[in-house]
């Protein structure tokens, strides 16, 4: 078992585990921790506890100290300088004629590094910009390219559900979302209905996907030939969460339909889940382009000096 505390550096943001050693820390405490990028200041969001070794990434970095009054004063001081740094960087971007959109600036709590976040359609050669910024601010500079999802997270907003965007309230990481998820959940493949504020497929498509996958492994597919108490028929529709089937029967030249619980039918020959109606087929090209853009968003471009 490993003793850990959970620390978050931004809200919302991912929670990272650290070794508190013998320090007395509690929920809400600001702490300075050791990271691969140097010392960082974060907040305790998971109280001290023990976890099995296999659930912890080794070696576990340490909590160096509870943040001092001076640490917190420095944090506020450098936060106050971020708007000025943003303005200067925007001017230099124009000077170098770079096609990039600066979205945010972040000083490390001790002023040892400044991160500039930006969006761009492709990769940007900003080496000269980094050098000039380093000469102005006299500290380490990093430019980090982010995707449109990260940009919307920083801007904030509400989703079509009327609630605050998930990425702005609780999501720690962006997980890959695919058209396949929408198809398996019987959701309309109209891009305007399954795209978020960022223009990418909505993150919430991922939330119930495991439940759908588990059920789909057991349920017959549309087009499957099944044996029922009323004879053999073809599955016309599947209500996945209810595990109910609409089965089509032929009676001479006419057809009729009946509903059954999936457990009450036997699959003779399975069908396919690749059924797409003509209207949805027209949207597939646009959806595949969204999927492609989402994969590109994960390949962030960064440089520092």
Image (cartoon, rainbow, N blue to C red):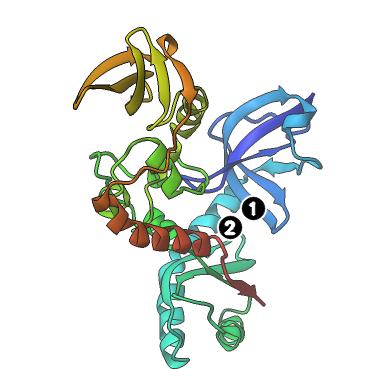
Q: Nearer the viewer, residue 267 or 177?
A: 267
Give the number of the disc on residue 109: 2
Looking at the image, residue 207 lies above or below residue 239: below
Quadrant in which the C terminus appears: bottom right
Residue at 61% x, 27% y is: 47
- Observer able to see residue 140: no
Q: How many marks?
A: 2
Residue at image point 38% right, 25% down: 240
Q: Is 255 placed above or below 111 here?
A: above
- Where residue 210 sits: x, y (%)? 50, 31
Instruction: Determine the image quadrant of residue 66.
Output: top right
Badge 2 marks a residue whose secondary structure is loop
Q: Position of residue 101 (x, y in %)?
A: 40, 75
Q: Residues within 10 Å of mark 1 (few under 14, many from 20)?
A: some
Are there few (<14), some (14-19), or many (20+) residues within 10 Å of tag 2?
many
Q: Are marks 1 and 2 in contact (CB under 8 Å)?
A: yes
Q: Which residue corresponds to mark 1?
A: 40
């Amino acid at each position: 078992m490993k003793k850990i505390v959970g620390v978050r550096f931004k809200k919302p943001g991912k929670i990272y585990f650290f070794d508190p050693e013998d320090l007395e820390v509690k929920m809400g405490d600001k702490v300075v921790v050791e990271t691969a990028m140097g010392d960082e200041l974060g907040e305790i969001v998971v109280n001290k506890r023990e976890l099995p070794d296999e659930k912890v990434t080794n070696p576990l970095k340490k909590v160096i100290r509870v943040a001092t009054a001076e640490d917190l004063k420095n944090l506020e001081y450098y936060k106050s300088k971020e708007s000025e740094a943003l303005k200067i960087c925007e001017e230099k971007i124009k000077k170098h004629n770079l096609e990039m959109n600066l979205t945010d600036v972040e000083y490390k709590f001790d002023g040892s590094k400044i991160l500039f976040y930006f969006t761009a359609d492709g990769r940007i050669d900003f080496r000269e910009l980094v050098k000039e910024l380093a000469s102005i601010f006299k500290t380490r500079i990093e430019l980090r390219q982010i995707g449109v999802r990260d940009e919307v997270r920083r801007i904030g907003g509400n989703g079509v559900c009327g609630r605050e965007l998930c990425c702005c309230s609780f999501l720690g990481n962006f997980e890959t979302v695919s058209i396949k998820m929408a198809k398996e959940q019987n959701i309309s493949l109209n891009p305007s209905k399954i795209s978020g504020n960022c223009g990418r497929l909505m993150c919430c498509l991922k939330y119930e996907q495991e439940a759908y996958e588990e059920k789909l492994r057991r349920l017959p597919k549309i087009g499957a030939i099944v044996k029922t108490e009323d004879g053999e028929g073809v599955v016309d529709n599947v209500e996945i969460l209810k595990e109910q089937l609409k089965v089509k029967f032929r009676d001479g030249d006419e057809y009729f339909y009946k509903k059954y619980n999936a457990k009450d039918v036997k699959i003779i020959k399975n069908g396919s889940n690749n059924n797409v109606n003509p209207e949805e087929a027209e949207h597939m090209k646009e959806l595949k382009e969204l999927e492609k853009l989402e994969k590109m968003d994960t390949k962030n471009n960064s440089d520092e000096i």
